[in-house]
Image (spheres, rainbow, N blue to C red):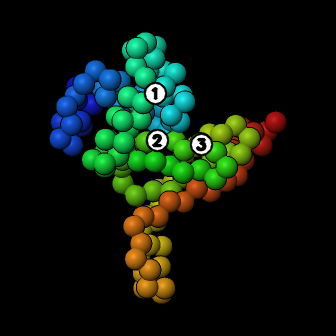
Amino acid sequence: MKHELLLKSNHLKATPQRLAIIDLMDRAGHISIDDLFQSIRQRFSSISLATLYKNIHTMMEKNLIREVKIPSQKTKYEIEKESHAHVMCECCGELKDIHFDPNTLLQTSIDVHNYQTKEVSIVILGICPECQKK
């Protein structure tokens, strides 16, 4: 029910496919288009990659979800939430949110360099505690 309200509050029709996309993103936290496509095809075998991309872009236009661009890897998607950064393990690929407001950097770039900026995306690469044990 909460996913249906999330879609409707963003002025989107709560189709079964969109509900499944939001549900999968909610459970995964961060998900690539390939993983999303494989998972959603288990529920909707006839869904095409083009339809999935169309829904993703529609939800991005409404600021319901956002892209997380990761250096040297495929983009992942997440449900939009408060400003934050990410930390990613270079070994296992785990991606986690860091509670940090990157907008302070955005304001600095405006104040110091007079840039017209749109957004800040921070991904810190490292090795997670589990992979360090290996």
Spatial separation of the CA atoms under disc 3 and disc 1: 15 Å
Q: Amino acid at mark 1?
A: Leu
Instruction: Tell me if 3 is positioned left or right of 95 in this view.
Output: left
Mark 2: few, some, or many residues within 10 Å (few <14, many ≥20)? many
Q: Is residue 27 visible?
A: no
Q: Is residue 3 visible?
A: yes
Q: Amino acid at mark 2?
A: Tyr
Spatial separation of the CA atoms under disc 2 and disc 1: 15 Å
- Please state the horizontal and vertical placement of residue 34, each as a whole percent of the image: 54, 30
Residue at x-position 31% and y-position 48%: 61
Q: Secondary structure beneath disc 2? A: strand
Numbered circle sitting on residue 49: 1
Q: Secondary structure beneath disc 1? A: helix
* Image quarter (top left, top right, bottom left or bottom right) of the N terminus: top left
Query: Mark 3 or 1, which is nearer the eye?
Result: 1
Residue at x-position 36% and y-position 54%: 82
Mark 1: few, some, or many residues within 10 Å (few <14, many ≥20)? some
Is 96 rendered above or below residue 114? above
Q: Which residue is mark 3?
A: 74
Q: Amino acid at mark 3?
A: Lys
Q: Earlier in the sequence, mark 3 or mark 1?
A: 1
* Image quarter (top left, top right, bottom left or bottom right) of the C terminus: top right
Is 2 rendered above or below residue 105? above
- Please state the horizontal and vertical placement of residue 74, each as a whole percent of the image: 59, 42
Q: Which residue is mark 2?
A: 77
- Please state the horizontal and vertical placement of residue 79, each as a whole percent of the image: 38, 42
- Please state the horizontal and vertical placement of residue 89, each as a whole percent of the image: 67, 45
Q: Secondary structure beneath disc 3? A: loop
Mark 3: few, some, or many residues within 10 Å (few <14, many ≥20)? few
Which residue is more in the foreground, 55 or 10? 55
